[in-house]
Image (cartoon, rainbow, N blue to C red):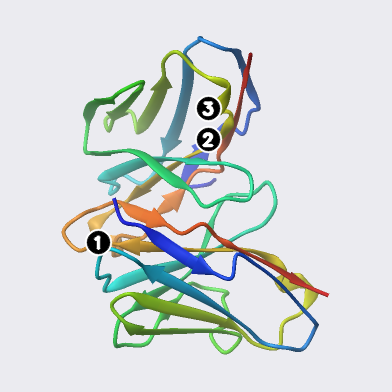
Amino acid sequence: QKEVEQDPGPLSVPEGAIVSLNCTYSNSAFQYFMWYRQYSRKGPELLMYTYSSGNKEDGRFTAQVDKSSKYISLFIRDSQPSDSATYLCAMSARAAGNKLTFGGGTRVLVKP
Amino acid sequence: GAVVSQHPSWVICKSGTSVKIECRSLDFQATTMFWYRQFPKQSLMLMATSNEGSKATYEQGVEKDKFLINHASLTLSTLTVTSAHPEDSSFYICSVWLAGFYEQYFGPGTRLTVT
């Protein structure tokens, strides 16, 4: 079993819909949680990061962390075709030297 | 966030030759950089942690004599793929970790094709 599980998709939604992404993990030591967006043949771009449990909002993006359930989510409101990309969750534990453990990524397609 | 560059963005080399990839942190001093490899339709796989002024730490299964890492300054880390083979063809990405923060910022990646 992988440390971080993420549905590979593809997830297809119409423009303007809410995109809902999530990851589950098994390592209770993870404290820092990040979401990255990666376009084809490009490096990952940091979208959101949170520490421990709670919610964080930034523009159209909302990240949620539920450490008790070992479950994190990313919501994208008013989705646009330009949001079509692969979304990667990543997490780390301070004791692990800030190494990131990635989910497999979810491919999202927003249709005009 | 930090701005990270990589050079070259794409390189083609012949089997048996060596290739050097540069990773630069343009606006922050980075004591720690990471090198990842990504195969098509797969997630990122950490290869090694590059620490300025000291030897890199390699992940299990990564050949340190094949993937040479040099972090000679606070803004530059290099990855040299020695005696490259077609199976080394991949997308290589570096990231910068900023002390006092928890997130990492990634470079645009380097596509290596070994013929």
Foreground residue among A104 and A15: A15
Q: CA distance from mark 2 to mark 3?
A: 18 Å
- The chain that hosts pointer 1 is B
Residue B71: % across, % down: 37, 82
Which residue is identified by label 2? Answer: A6
Numbered disc in front, either 2 or 3:
3
Residue B20: % across, % down: 58, 82
Marks 2 & 3 on one chain = yes
How many numbered marks appear?
3
Disc 1 + disc 3, Cβ < 8 Å: no
Above or below A86: residue A74: above
- The chain that hosts pointer 2 is A
Q: CA distance from mark 1 to mark 3?
A: 27 Å
Q: Quick one: label 1, few (<14), some, or many (20+) residues within 10 Å?
A: some
Label 3 sits on what residue type?
Asp
Q: Residue at x 40, y 21 (%)?
A: A75
The label shown at residue A3 is none
Disc 2 + disc 1, Cβ < 8 Å: no
Q: Residue at x 22, y 32 (%)?
A: A53
Quadrant assignment, res A47 = top left
Q: Residue furthest right?
A: B115
The label shown at residue A83 is 3
Which residue is identified by label 1? Answer: B98
